[in-house]
Image (tube, grey):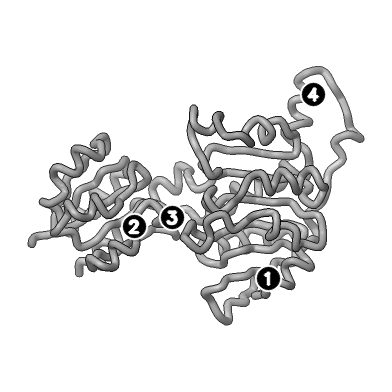
Amino acid sequence: MKTNILIVDDIHEIMLRKFEQAGISYNYQPDIQREDAEKIIADYSGLVIRSKFQVDRAFFELAPNLRFIARAGAGMDNIDDECALQKQVALISANEGNCDAVGEHMIGMLLSLMNNLNRADQQVRSGQWLREANRGYELKGRTVGLIGYGHNGMAMAKKLSGFDVHVLAYDKYRVDYTDQYAQAADMETIYQQADILSFHIPLTAETEGMIDRQYLSRFEKPIFFLLGARGGIVHVPAVLHGLDQGSILGAAFDVLPVEKFPKLAEQHWYQDLIGRENVMLSPHVAGWTFESYYKLSAVAADKIIRFLK
């Protein structure tokens, strides 16, 4: 079957240009909804998606000619990878495209937490000049624990290198990954030494709900908690408990287990979360910069072209 790709999400035009230069046929439908994609997917051998809908078993059953699915983003948790394997459909991600954006964003959140920047800004705007109440912490000399050392974890470590911190990285699926920016470590070492904890792992059956009270109780020092990976790996009430106990000094969430309104506001922990001055939130934008919009599409296109060749 001739390669013909259905693109169901908004992507940068660089992907379309690369496909045209490579002589690859595509149908760009950024506004298409799942029910309409289901009606035509049988005609396509490739699918490009971001986060519009879940590519589940029911969708796969309607796509007998599918050879690959590419995601112009990091992570593949909106695709049934077991079904893809059974049906011999290759999965292509573009993790390299937004790792710099994620690293910069999470460090920005960390610095803001450590220096009370959001609170201080609001106080000055309301006529309060409270210096002592906003005394901050310095990063220098602290130990950062990175959980996961793929593209995102490595980018984070590189960006931290100018802050004179000690970076420990734990990655269950890698060996010999110590480099100039991070030292490979086991979890026991991170439990003992970490002052700052940042997650860079995908959402899988293994990691879903991994960060619970038991997990967080093992850290021996009070930590700053950063989550810019996937919201489904955390049990939010466990973080709130840590904040109450003082075992977590501050928490930054770019992702949450439930995202978008009104459903987010309906969660039993939501009001508690937003009422805390030592919690910082952003709407899943850590990897979504003007630059990463281009890079994600370019990386995904290059990988698709290599796969087809």
Q: In this view, does 250 lie to the left or right of 79?
A: right
**Residue that label 3 marks:** 74
* Numbered mark located on residue 53 in the image: none
Q: What element carries label 4?
A: helix
Q: How many marks?
A: 4
Q: Quadrant of residue 51?
A: top left
Image x and y of residue 183, in percent:
67, 74
The residue most toward the bottom is 176
Disc 2: CA contacts within 10 A as few (<14), some (14-19) or many (>=20): some
Q: What residue type is labelled 4?
A: Val
Q: Is mark 3 on a helix, strand or loop?
A: loop
Q: What residue type is labelled 1?
A: Met
Nearest to viewer (mark 3 / mark 4): 3
Image x and y of residue 142, in percent:
79, 61
Q: What element carries label 2?
A: loop
For the residues bearing labels 1 and 2, Cβ distance under 8 angstroms: no
Q: In which quarter of the image is the N terminus?
A: bottom left
**Residue that label 2 marks:** 80
**Residue that label 4 marks:** 124
The residue most toward the right is 132
Label located before the other in sequence (3 or 2): 3
Mark 3 and mark 4: span between their CA atoms?
Answer: 38 Å
